[in-house]
Image (cartoon, rainbow, N blue to C red):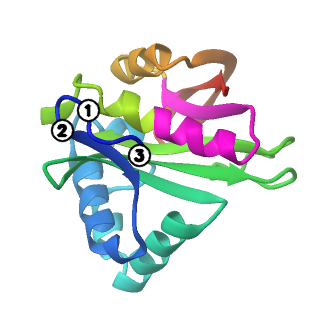
Amino acid sequence: MPGPDASGLIVRRIRADEWAAVRALRLESTSDPDAGIAFLETPEQVAARADDFWRERAEKAATSETTAQFVAVVDEVWVGSLSVLIRATGQKDHLGRYVDDRRADVVGVYVSPGHRGAGAVDALLAAAAEWAAGLGLDRIWLDVHRDNHRAQGAYRRAGFAATGETYSSAIGPEIVMSRPLP
């Protein structure tokens, strides 16, 4: 990963021992009224999970070749995050959809309100794309709520385009977007 940009923003993969920070940022993201439209769980569900859940989640997101979590950090404060899940052919994704070809799915995208519009999401998506390309994938995917126009704009700016696939989930109508990897 490159060093900090002009604003001091650094994007990096989480470390296994950062499980408490992973939990805290997830609680923040699911509690944010503007971001809540993007998450399939509530703050209450996040808070109810035991420490062991978060330890295991951070360990996998820090070391696995099937899951990675990246954080945007400014002055040692986590200001954003996303995860990338590698789905094997024949698996079902987090919504029960059949995966017909190995793919990388971006999930859990969040940038704290004070850092939105400052490039954090672009840097996070670039890190996700670099990691997935390093695993030999040629495309990266994500789902976004139909009414989340700000997120859609950020994803288009990062090279994503709507695939034409739509569906309805627990949070309502969603569209599928993807982008090719270098």
Measuring from the top left, give residue 16's x and y in whole percent: 42, 74
> Is the C terminus in the top left, top right, bottom left or bottom right quadrant?
top right
Q: Residues within 10 Å of mark 1 (few under 14, many from 20)?
A: few
Provide the residue designation for mark 3. 39
Measuring from the top left, give residue 147's x and y in whole percent: 41, 20
Provide the residue designation for mark 1. 5
- Marks 3 and 2, how far apart in space? 28 Å
Label 1, secondary structure: give it: loop
Label 2, secondary structure: give it: loop
Q: Is residue 137 magenta?
A: yes
Frontmost residue, 42 versus 118: 118
Label 3, secondary structure: give it: loop
Q: Which range of residues does the magenta coloring cover?
A: 126-145
Query: Which numbered marker is on residue 8?
Result: 2
Q: Residues within 10 Å of mark 3 (few under 14, many from 20)?
A: many
The amino acid marked with disc number 1 is Asp
